[in-house]
Image (cartoon, rainbow, N blue to C red):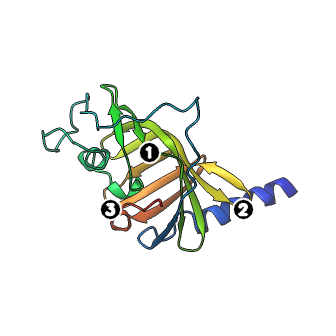
Amino acid sequence: MAKHHLHLIVTLLFVATILTTPGTTSASSSTPPPTATSPPPPTATSPPAAPPPPGSSPAAPRTAYEMLEQYNLSRGILPEGVTGYDLRPDGSFEVYLPGDCSVHVAGGTPIRYSSVIAGNIQSQWIRALKGVKVKVLLTWIAITGVNRTQDGQLNFFAGRISKSFPVDKFANSPQCV
């Protein structure tokens, strides 16, 4: 019974604090030196190998931010400073940052981006997301998916928990310093 109450409290705190107002962020950085296990990021963006989703422009996106917009997602779900990306024909992708990045959104909710963010993208969805976490109490919880709804909301998924925000809150990327 106590475990159920603790799970409920953690869930409620997560839902109440995750990305509450990403339009007013303050940034901080936690950039460790490169290690032998981290792959070097590419120096230029890679053209997409997958065809654009229906209704998008046929021009190949030059940046990861343009790739998100091509799939009808907001550029603000990625922090500033992306150095490149790879997009494969099956929709799997990797986005590269110069290092790990921590952003504190209003209310002090920390979000952590790894130097490599991966997932699978399709029109209005990112699934199997890896490399993005939110801190709830003392625990880092992985954000595993993002989708855009027809009514202009972005839903963020962390396990069985989800939280919705207006898409216009993600018009600008948070800055990692």
Q: Residue furthest front?
A: 33
Q: Going 35% across and 37% down the picture, which residue do you hit? A: 85
Dividing the image into 4 quarters, which one contains the N terminus?
bottom right
In the rendered image, the residue lying farthest to the left is: 58
Q: Is residue 16 left or right of residue 23?
A: right
Residue 7: mark in rendering: none
Q: Nearer the viewer, mark 1 or mark 2?
A: 1
Confirm whether residue 1 shows in the render: no
**Where residue 47 appears, x then y in whole percent?**
24, 33
C-alpha span from label 1 to label 2: 26 Å
Please state which of residues 117 and 12 is positioned toward the viewer in this rendering: 117
Q: CA distance from mark 3 to mark 1?
A: 28 Å
* Quadrant of res 7: bottom right
Label 1, secondary structure: give it.
Answer: loop
Residue 41, image quadrant: top left
Label placed on residue 137? 2
Q: Residue at x 21, y 31 (%)?
A: 51
With respect to residue 22, does 156 lie above or below?
A: above
Q: Mark 1 or mark 3, which is nearer the start of the sequence? A: 1
Residue 152, numbered circle: 3
Q: Which numbered disc, 1 or 2, marks the residue that appears first in the sequence?
A: 1
x 45%, y 45%: residue: 98
Q: Amino acid at mark 2?
A: Leu
62 left or right of 100 in image: left
Residue 53 lies, with reference to residue 176, above or below; the image says: above
Q: Which residue is nearer to you in this view: 102 or 107?
A: 102
Does dot 2 land on a helix, a strand or a loop? loop
Q: Which residue is mark 1?
A: 97
Q: Residues within 10 Å of mark 3 (few under 14, many from 20)?
A: few
Q: Amino acid at mark 3?
A: Gly
